[in-house]
Image: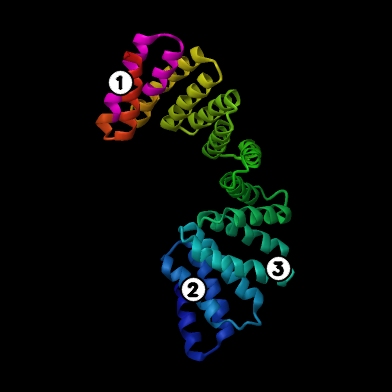
Amino acid sequence: METARAARQALRAEGDVLTLARTALLHGRLIQRHGGDLEELLGAFGEVLAVAPRSEAELRAVAHASRGEVLVMVDRAAEAAEDLIEAVALFTALGSPDSAALARVDLATAYLATGRPMDAAVTAEEAMALLDPDDLDNRTAVQWARANALGLLDDHEGALADFTALIPLYKEPMQAARAADSAARVLDRLDRDAEAAEAFATAAGYYEAAGSSGDRGRMLRRRALSLHWAGESERALEAGEQARPLLEDEPFELATLAYDQARVLQALDRNPEAVARAREALEQFTALGDSDAAETAKELLGWLED
């Protein structure tokens, strides 16, 4: 990398802008591969765009795409979108659909992060149509972006289809867990409670495989509530008790579990136990300083004790 840095300095002095642009691009890629200062990395790609002639469309397209990719990774999505829009346009004009598709993957993510779900969904759809069917990494990345965008657009069925399709495609348990978790939450919003309960159970299994006991506990708590709404309150209590030991380090989740169990016990006409759980929830929410949740638990307790 030192050689590339020195070469750039020499080329600036010589005024050889085209070779300077190519060297700056190479330098940026070396920093990406081997690690280095973020601002130097962005500066390398920025120099390409500052000096490369407009006639060097491919060089400029690669620099825009490379800088956009980096900016997405460091959560500077608004800047990333500007670069990636340019990259898509240039690659398309150059007749490079494969490169344009890859730029769209990052662009969909950038649009999603900047609160533009419609643009994210459209861009993701375009990328899915162009990506190689065997390019699993990019296809799953852009399908994840589309799923989240569709959810924000209230296309819950579309989001559910994408999240569900992603679960078996992921190699890492944590990624599969998040997809199953998201699918379950969509089913919950759609009031498809029995299906949601099963999806939360699936997510809990993947979280367990990923070694995340707290997330597994949260899924089991949510599964319990879905079972309750599905009319299976006895199973809901069992699921809740499975969740309890996993949530020892999650005080808010424990308090929420106590509140949920109070409602389940109420439905089963087990009033004394329901009162005990409601008191537990009230005490825990109060200790956490969550006044709204504490007030809700207090109302339930009042109803049970009336």
Badge 3 or badge 1: first in the primary sequence: 3
Q: Main secondary structure of the magenta part?
A: helix
Quarter the C terminus occupies: top left
Residue at 49%, 17% (x, y): give it.
236
Residue at 43%, 65% (x, y): give it.
38
**Mark 2 or mark 3: which is in front?**
3
- Nearer-the-camera pick, 93 or 116: 116
Element at label 2 = helix
Q: Residue furthest bottom?
A: 14
Q: Residues within 10 Å of mark 1 (few under 14, many from 20)?
A: many
Mark number displayed over residue 44: 2
Magenta residues span: 258-285
Element at label 3 = helix
- Nearer-the-camera pick, 29 or 194: 194
- Nearer-the-camera pick, 7 or 91: 91
Instruction: Identify the residue under disc 3.
Output: 92
**Mark 3 or mark 1: which is in front?**
1
Please state the horizontal and vertical placement of residue 239, each as a whole percent of the image: 47, 19
Q: Are marks 1 and 2 in contact (CB under 8 Å)?
A: no
Residue at 58%, 44% (x, y): give it.
151
Q: Is residue 170 above or below residue 42?
A: above
Q: Residue furthest front?
A: 306
Please state the horizontal and vertical placement of residue 169, each as a whole percent of the image: 64, 39
Q: Are marks 3 and 1 in contact (CB under 8 Å)?
A: no
Among the 4 quarters of the image, the one containing residue 162: top right
Cα–Cα span, label 2 and label 3: 24 Å
Instruction: Identify the residue under disc 1.
Output: 280
Cα–Cα span, label 3 and label 1: 61 Å
Among the 4 quarters of the image, the one containing residue 61: bottom right
Q: Is residue 46 shown to the viewer in this render?
A: yes
Cα–Cα span, label 1 and label 2: 58 Å
Mark number displayed over residue 66: none
